[in-house]
Image (cartoon, coloured by chain):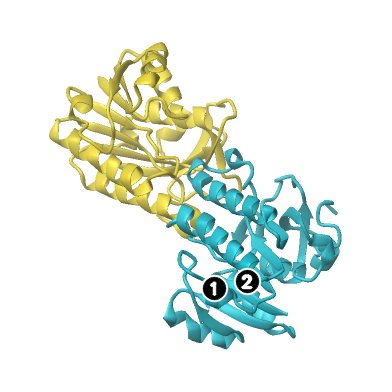
Chain colours: A yellow, B cyan
Amino acid sequence: MHVLVAGSHGQVGQHVTAMLAQTDHEVRGMVRDEAQTTDVEELGAEPVLADLTEDVTHAVEGCDAVVFAAGSGGEDVEGVDRDGAVNIIETAEREGADRFVMLSSINADSPGDSPAELRPYLEAKAAADERLRESSLTDTIVRPGALTDEPGTGRVRTGADLDRKSDDIPREDVAEVLVAALEMEPTYGLTFEVLSGDEPIEDALADPLNQG
Amino acid sequence: MHVLVAGSHGQVGQHVTAMLAQTDHEVRGMVRDEAQTTDVEELGAEPVLADLTEDVTHAVEGCDAVVFAAGSGGEDVEGVDRDGAVNIIETAEREGADRFVMLSSINADSPGDSPAELRPYLEAKAAADERLRESSLTDTIVRPGALTDEPGTGRVRTGADLDRKSDDIPREDVAEVLVAALEMEPTYGLTFEVLSGDEPIEDALADPLNQG
């Protein structure tokens, strides 16, 4: 497949890009800043310059799948996390892509469970997720807990509404979930939470709504 | 003392207002919406209508102390959490108030330890705290962890840089810390973190930088 990584230079996106580059997919890494294109090339992807808040047709064109790992970091949640995501979803529909894997967030549908200052971000993510579900694309919506920079363990737990006894997960494991989900049919059309756990990622994704 | 509560109708502010109203201080509760003034009266304070992003002189005038419990909830962190706080700090200096107790946030000086989407909020809080320290006011800066709606326990731990083995605290306990700090000299001029713990609040505030 031709796969576009939106947010290819982000903290999760770099892992996603590097992992996809090890597969036989053709990988395009979308970044906003020209200065980031060299890094994306070094990760093994073809860089494409595009801004989520503007026309992204040239980035999406010819792609079969999009992995959305972009984020505003809180700087412009309505413009980037919500409208930027909707923009690329609608472009993907129009350009005939089929598959869309979304990096969302735990508590996106229950912002009251997170600090009040995260609410605008979570509401933006929930709105983008909702638009994706309503789209003609085959969606998978992945909602990790608090992201850490610990090395990945390859083991997670997934479910529709996980208990929060522990609430974090390494970015590297989140990236592996996004990449593995891309071609695992049991994840198609589903929204699920993911946290560090005991199950190998492929086992967890074989039945993602069932906390294994 | 005459005490102004900024953000009197907020989730922490309502506790602060009700607790102060039980003391012999004269309490003024600042709110932005006329509809909130009845609630503030019922909490036992004199309501005053003012917007942190505009002139707040009439609210601060005649007050000896300000307890800052206002927050944007993430909607306008630069405008409210940073510039709104600086606005009332500078008004308090000009109007001759002496004491200022600030509700800040854990990780305000280390935004990398929180989700990226909280960073703009934490940076806004850190900038306001810095301006307060540089002011002529006698400051206390209180940095609680994740706020919960559990009932208060009256017991906390405080310190310059607490371990995060647990990271939350009921809003009611945070309010009690802000109110108790108002007249406890060992807190003057200090910035400290607070989480749920084992020490009675007055004991913890007798030596706030020492994790008891």
Q: Earlier in the sequence, mark 2 or mark 1?
A: 1
Same chain for the residues under marks 2 and 1 in the image:
yes
| Callout 2 touching callout 1 (CB < 8 Å) | yes
Q: CA distance from mark 2 to mark 1?
A: 8 Å
Name which quarter of the figure residue B184 lies in: bottom right
Determine the secondary structure under disc 2: loop
Q: Nearer the viewer, residue B6 or A192?
A: B6
**At x 53% / y 26%, what residue is drawn?**
A154
Q: Residue furthest front?
A: B94
The label on residue B95 is: 2
Q: Give me the disc on residue B57.
A: 1
What's the residue at 70%, 60% (across, down)?
B136
> Residue placed at 72% from the left, 56% from the top?
B194
Q: Nearer the viewer, residue B60 or A40?
A: B60
Dot 1 falls on a residue whose secondary structure is helix
Residue A161: tell me if it is visible. Answer: yes
